[in-house]
Image: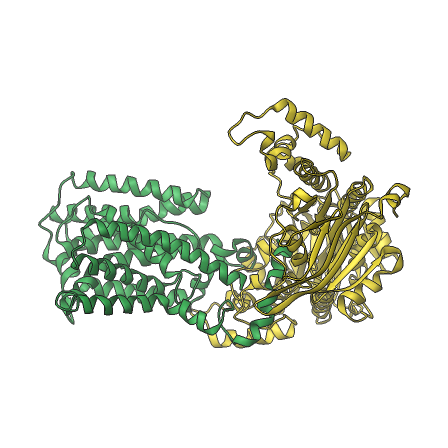
Chain colours: A yellow, B green
C-alpha cells in the first residue's frame, strides 16, 4: 500500500503514546494505551461504542487530561501532558461535522481559524488570503474555486477543506502534520467514502500522517496501513494491514470470534402481500411500484440523492408523496397522516437518530414506551405499567445498561438505536421501514439490531430497508431494488443478489 | 456528534449499578440535594427571617399577605410554564394580563354585565393566543421576538382602552371574585393554587405533559412517532394566553381598580420562577412544583429583606439576579444530567 517515498520516511514517528491511562470517578476508561503512528501512514483506530476511541483522541488533542504516568511525543518531540495547543506541535483533529461554515465560501472558511491572517480588528488582506487559499487547495489537489459556497461541495471535498484549514493553522509552527479524523465517513455513501479514503491516502503520501476512526471494516481494510483496535479501554490488537483480515479486527473488537456476522433470515413463508406501492412519486422518487409480502425483507440501494433514502419517509408519511397509492393489507393509506399510519401498523426507524429517533433528554423509559403512549389514547399515564414494560423491553433488546431512568443521551449510539428499535418493534408493526438501521452502531450491537429486524419479518411483518451498506443488504434482504434518479433500475434477488451485484447496479 | 458523546458516558454507564435508580445518574445524596435544595432554601429563609424578625415576619398575617401577593404571579408562572416546557417563550403574558384587565375593567365600569365583561377579557386572551400560534406555530417566526413585540403592543393597548387613567368603580361581583376570603385566604390564592394543581397533574401524569417535553426536546422524533407536534404547541400557547387573560381579570378584581402601568412588574418573576423551578424536583425540566417553590423563595426573600428595612429597589435587584442565577443553574443542571 505504501509506495517507495513513504517507506523512506516511515522510520520517522508522527505520534507515540506510552502508558496513557484515564480514570473517571474511579472507573478506568483507558488503561496503558500504547500507540505508534509513522509518518506517511494511514492508521485506523477501531473499537466498539464505548471502547475508548474518542477518549484517546481527546487526550491527544488536550480536551481532557490523561492520568499521570504516561507520555506522548509528536514528530519526535516530547509533549508535556496534559496537551495544550496540539496544533503548535503538528496535530490537528478533524471532527465528524468538520466545523465548516456552510453558508460561507471556501475562502472565508479557510481563514476563520487564523483570524484571516490579521489582528482581531486589523484589516484583512483579501489578496494574500486568496493566494494562500489557492496554494492550500493546490497542495491538497482540490479542484474548487475559493469563491464557491461550502454547502455546494461534496462531503469528500469538504473534508479536504477542513484538512487544508487545519494545515494553515499549523504551518506557522511546523511542517509535519498528523491529522486525526473522527468517523469521517459515518454518514457518507460508498462512493463518497471512497473519495474521503483517497483523500486521506494522498495526505499521508505527502509525508503527513493520518489517523482515522471508522466502523466500516471494508474501507479500513482497503485504505489503512496499520490497524489498532481498542476494547474496554485497552489496545486489544495492533497490526499492519497486510498481517490480518476482517476477522482479526472483529475478534479484537468483540474479544471473541463472531461466527456469523449476520443473523439468519428465514425464507418468505409464502405470505400474502402486506404492502402494495403503485406509481409512487415524491421529491426524487419517480413512479416506483413494488409489493412486499408478509415475512419479506426488501432492500433499497442507490447513491446519495438517487431516491432510495426518500422511500422510507414516503411510505411512513413524513415525506409528501406527489403521486401514487400505498396500500397496507388492501387498505389505501396514501392520504393518511403520520399518526394514522402509525395506528395502521407502520413503524419508521429513521436515519438521523439524533434528530428523529430519540428524545435525548428523555429517559430510556419515556422513549421506549412512546409508541404505546401515543397509541394508548389514555387520559393519564400509567406510570407503573410503563416502568414494567420499559424494563422488559430494554432487557429484550439488549440495551446496556437496562436502566429505565437513564437519559437517552447517556447511552452510546448503538444502545440508542436499540432503544429506537424497541420503541417501534414493540408495537407489533405490520410494516417496518428502516433508513440506515445500523449507522454508527458497532459490530456487536449491529448483530443484535439486525436480529430484531429479522425476527420481525419472521413474525409476519413486511420490512423495508434502505441502506448504503451493500454487504448488509445482500445478507439481510430477500430482494433489493436499486434506484437511480428516482426510478428503479434493477431488481436483485436470489442468486443475482450479492454485495458486488448491488454495487455494480448502483454505480452502473 | 454520536461518537463524541458516546465515550463520555462510559464512567456513568459502569457506575450506574452502584447508585440504584434515579433520573440522570448522580449519587443518591447529590440527587436528593439537587431535587430538594430549593425547598430547603425556602425553609432556611423562613427560619432565618423568623428568628431575625419574630414580630413582623413570623406572623400569620405576613404569610397570608405573601400568599396573596404571589397569587397573580403564580397564575402567570403556570401560564408561562406551558410553552416553556415545550421549548418556546411567551413574553406576551404580562402585556396580555394588563390588556385583558383593562378591557374587562372599562366594560364593567360602563355598566356591562359581569359575565360579558369577563368573557371579553378572556376573549382577548383567545385572540392573542390565536395570533401567537399563527405566527409562531404555523409560520415558524421566532417565539421570543414575536411575543416580545406582542407584549409591548398589548401594554400600549391597555393604555388606549383605559384612556391612560386608572379605572375605578368596579362592580361588587368582580371584587368578590378576587377578594372573597375562604378559610382565611383570598379567593385569588385558592384559584392560583387550583390552576397550578391542574397544571401539575397535566404535566406529570398525562400524555400531553410528556408530549410537551418531547416536542420541545426532539420535534423530529415526536412527529415521526405520530404526535401532532403543531397541535401540542398550539394548545400550549392557547392555554398560556387564556390563563394570562384570566390573571388580568382576577388582578383587577383583587386590587379593585385597573392601573394600565401595572403590567411591567409582573413579567420577570414568572420567568425566574420557571427557570429556577427547573433546577428542582424534576431537575432539568420545567415543572410546576419546582416553579411554585421558586416563586415562594423569591417572595419570602424579598419580603424578609424589605421588612428588615431594605429599599424598594431591592426587589428588582433580587428578582433580576435570581433570573440570571436561575437560567445559569438550570443550564448547568441539564448539562450535568446529560454528562453523568
Corner quadrant of residue B85: bottom left
Q: Is residue B235 visible?
A: no
Q: Residue most toward the top?
A: A127
Task: State the residue in front, A115 or A295.
Answer: A115
Q: Is B94 displayed left or right of A344 in the figure?
A: left
Viewer-side residue, A26 vs A500: A26
Give the quadrant of the C terminus of chain A.
top right
**Residue B299 vs residue B199, the one in the foreground:** B299
Picture residue at 62% right of the left edge, 60% below the top = B6
Decide: is B336 above or below B136.
below
Residue A85 shown left or right of residue B212 in the figure: right
Residue A207, position as x, y percentages in the image: 80, 41
Q: Position of residue B105 (x, y in %)?
A: 16, 48
Q: Is residue B309 visible?
A: yes
Q: Residue at x 34, y 49 (%)?
A: B129
The tally of labels here is 0
- Residue at the limit of the structure toward the right, as seen here: A4
Q: Position of residue A436 (x, y in %)?
A: 70, 56
> Residue at the spot x=16%, y=59% of the render?
B307
> Horizontal and vertical percent for residue A214?
74, 54
Judge by depth and name the residue closer to the eye, B116 or A22.
Answer: A22
Name which quarter of the figure residue A296 lies in. bottom right
Amino acid at each position: 500500500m505504501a509506495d517507495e517515498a513513504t517507506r523512506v520516511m516511515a522510520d520517522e514517528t508522527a505520534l507515540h503514546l506510552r502508558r496513557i491511562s484515564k480514570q473517571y470517578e474511579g472507573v478506568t476508561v483507558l488503561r496503558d494505551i500504547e500507540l505508534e503512528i509513522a509518518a506517511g501512514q494511514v492508521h485506523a483506530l477501531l473499537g466498539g461504542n464505548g471502547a475508548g476511541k474518542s477518549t484517546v483522541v481527546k487526550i491527544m488533542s488536550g480536551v481532557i487530561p490523561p492520568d499521570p504516568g504516561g507520555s506522548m511525543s509528536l514528530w519526535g518531540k516530547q509533549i508535556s501532558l496534559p496537551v495544550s495547543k496540539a496544533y503548535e506541535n503538528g496535530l490537528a483533529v478533524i471532527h465528524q461535522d468538520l466545523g465548516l461554515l456552510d453558508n460561507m465560501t471556501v475562502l472565508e472558511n479557510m481563514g476563520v481559524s487564523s483570524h484571516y491572517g490579521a489582528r482581531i480588528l486589523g484589516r484583512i488582506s483579501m489578496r494574500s488570503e486568496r493566494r494562500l487559499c489557492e496554494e492550500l487547495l493546490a497542495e491538497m489537489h482540490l479542484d474548487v474555486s475559493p469563491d464557491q459556497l461550502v454547502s455546494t461541495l461534496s462531503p469528500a471535498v469538504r473534508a479536504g477543506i477542513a484538512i487544508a484549514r487545519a494545515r494553515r493553522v499549523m504551518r506557522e509552527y511546523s511542517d509535519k502534520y498528523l491529522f486525526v479524523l473522527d468517523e469521517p465517513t459515518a454518514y457518507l455513501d460508498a462512493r463518497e467514502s471512497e473519495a474521503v479514503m483517497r483523500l486521506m491516502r494522498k495526505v499521508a503520501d505527502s509525508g503527513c500522517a493520518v489517523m482515522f476512526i471508522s466502523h466500516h471494516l471494508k474501507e479500513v481494510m482497503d485504505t489503512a496501513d496499520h490497524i489498532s483496535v481498542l476494547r474496554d479501554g485497552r489496545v486489544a490488537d495492533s497490526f499492519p494491514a497486510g498481517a490480518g483480515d476482517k476477522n482479526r479486527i472483529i475478534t479484537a473488537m468483540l474479544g471473541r470470534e463472531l461466527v456469523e456476522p449476520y443473523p439468519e433470515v428465514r425464507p418468505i413463508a409464502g405470505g400474502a402481500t402486506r404492502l402494495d406501492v403503485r406509481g409512487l412519486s415524491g421529491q426524487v422518487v419517480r413512479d416506483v411500484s413494488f409489493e412486499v409480502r408478509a415475512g419479506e425483507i426488501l432492500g433499497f440501494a442507490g447513491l446519495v440523492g438517487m431516491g432510495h433514502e426518500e422511500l422510507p419517509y414516503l411510505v411512513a408519511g413524513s415525506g409528501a408523496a406527489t403521486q401514487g397509492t400505498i396500500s397496507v393489507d388492501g387498505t389505501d393509506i396514501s392520504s393518511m397522516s403520520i399518526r394514522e399510519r402509525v395506528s395502521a401498523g407502520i413503524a419508521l426507524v429513521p436515519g438521523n437518530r439524533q434528530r428523529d429517533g430519540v428524545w435525548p433528554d428523555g429517559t430510556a423509559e419515556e422513549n421506549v414506551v412512546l409508541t404505546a403512549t401515543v397509541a394508548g389514547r389514555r387520559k393519564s399515564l400509567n406510570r407503573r405499567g410503563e416502568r414494567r414494560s420499559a424494563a422488559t423491553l430494554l432487557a429484550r433488546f439488549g440495551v446496556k445498561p437496562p436502566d429505565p431512568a437513564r437519559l437517552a443521551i447517556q447511552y452510546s449510539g448503538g444502545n440508542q438505536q436499540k432503544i429506537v428499535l424497541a420503541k417501534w418493534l414493540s408495537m407489533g408493526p405490520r410494516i417496518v421501514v428502516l433508513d440506515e438501521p445500523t449507522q454508527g452502531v458497532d459490530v456487536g450491537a449491529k448483530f443484535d439490531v439486525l436480529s430484531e429486524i429479522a425476527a420481525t419479518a419472521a413474525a409476519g411483518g413486511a420490512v423495508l430497508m434502505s441502506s448504503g451498506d451493500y454487504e448488509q443488504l445482500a445478507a439481510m434482504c430477500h430482494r433489493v431494488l436499486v434506484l437511480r434518479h428516482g426510478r428503479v433500475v434493477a431488481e436483485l434477488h436470489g442468486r443475482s443478489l450479492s454485495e458486488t451485484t448491488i454495487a455494480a447496479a448502483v454505480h452502473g | 456528534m454520536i461518537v463524541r458523546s458516546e465515550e463520555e458516558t462510559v464512567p456513568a454507564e459502569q457506575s450506574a449499578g452502584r447508585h440504584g435508580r434515579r433520573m440522570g445518574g448522580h449519587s443518591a445524596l447529590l440527587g436528593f440535594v439537587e431535587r430538594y435544595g430549593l425547598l430547603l432554601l425556602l425553609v432556611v429563609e423562613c427560619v432565618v427571617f423568623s428568628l431575625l424578625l419574630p414580630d413582623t415576619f413570623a406572623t400569620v398575617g405576613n404569610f397570608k399577605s405573601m400568599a396573596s401577593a404571589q397569587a397573580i404571579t403564580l397564575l402567570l408562572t403556570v401560564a408561562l410554564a406551558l410553552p416553556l416546557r415545550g421549548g418556546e417563550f411567551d413574553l406576551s403574558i404580562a402585556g396580555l394580563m394588563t390588556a385583558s384587565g383593562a378591557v374587562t375593567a372599562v366594560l364593567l365600569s360602563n355598566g356591562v354585565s359581569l359575565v360579558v365583561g369577563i368573557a371579553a377579557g378572556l376573549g382577548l386572551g383567545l385572540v392573542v393566543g390565536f395570533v401567537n400560534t399563527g405566527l409562531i406555530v404555523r409560520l415558524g417566526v421566532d417565539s421570543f421576538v414575536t411575543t416580545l413585540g406582542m407584549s409591548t403592543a398589548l401594554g400600549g393597548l391597555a393604555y388606549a382602552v383605559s384612556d391612560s387613567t386608572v379605572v375605578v368603580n368596579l362592580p361588587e361581583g368582580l371584587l368578590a371574585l378576587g377578594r372573597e376570603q375562604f378559610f382565611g385566604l383570598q379567593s385569588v390564592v385558592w384559584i392560583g393554587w387550583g390552576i397550578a394543581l391542574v397544571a401539575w397533574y397535566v404535566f406529570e401524569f398525562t400524555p400531553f405533559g410528556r408530549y410537551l417535553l418531547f416536542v420541545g426536546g426532539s420535534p423530529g422524533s415526536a412527529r415521526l412517532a405520530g404526535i401532532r407536534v403543531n397541535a401540542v404547541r398550539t394548545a400550549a400557547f392557547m392555554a398560556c394566553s387564556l390563563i394570562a387573560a384570566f390573571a388580568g381579570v382576577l388582578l383587577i378584581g383583587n386590587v379593585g381598580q385597573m392601573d394600565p402601568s401595572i403590567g411591567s412588574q409582573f413579567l420577570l418573576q414568572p420567568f425566574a420562577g420557571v427557570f429556577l423551578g427547573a433546577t428542582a424536583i424534576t431537575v432539568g425540566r420545567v415543572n410546576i412544583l419546582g416553579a411554585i417553590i421558586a416563586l415562594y423563595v423569591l417572595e419570602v426573600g424579598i419580603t424578609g429583606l424589605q421588612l428588615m428595612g431594605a429599599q424598594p429597589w431591592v426587589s428588582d435587584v433580587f428578582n433580576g439576579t435570581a433570573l440570571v442565577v436561575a437560567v445559569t443553574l438550570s443550564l448547568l443542571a441539564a448539562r450535568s444530567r446529560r454528562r453523568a
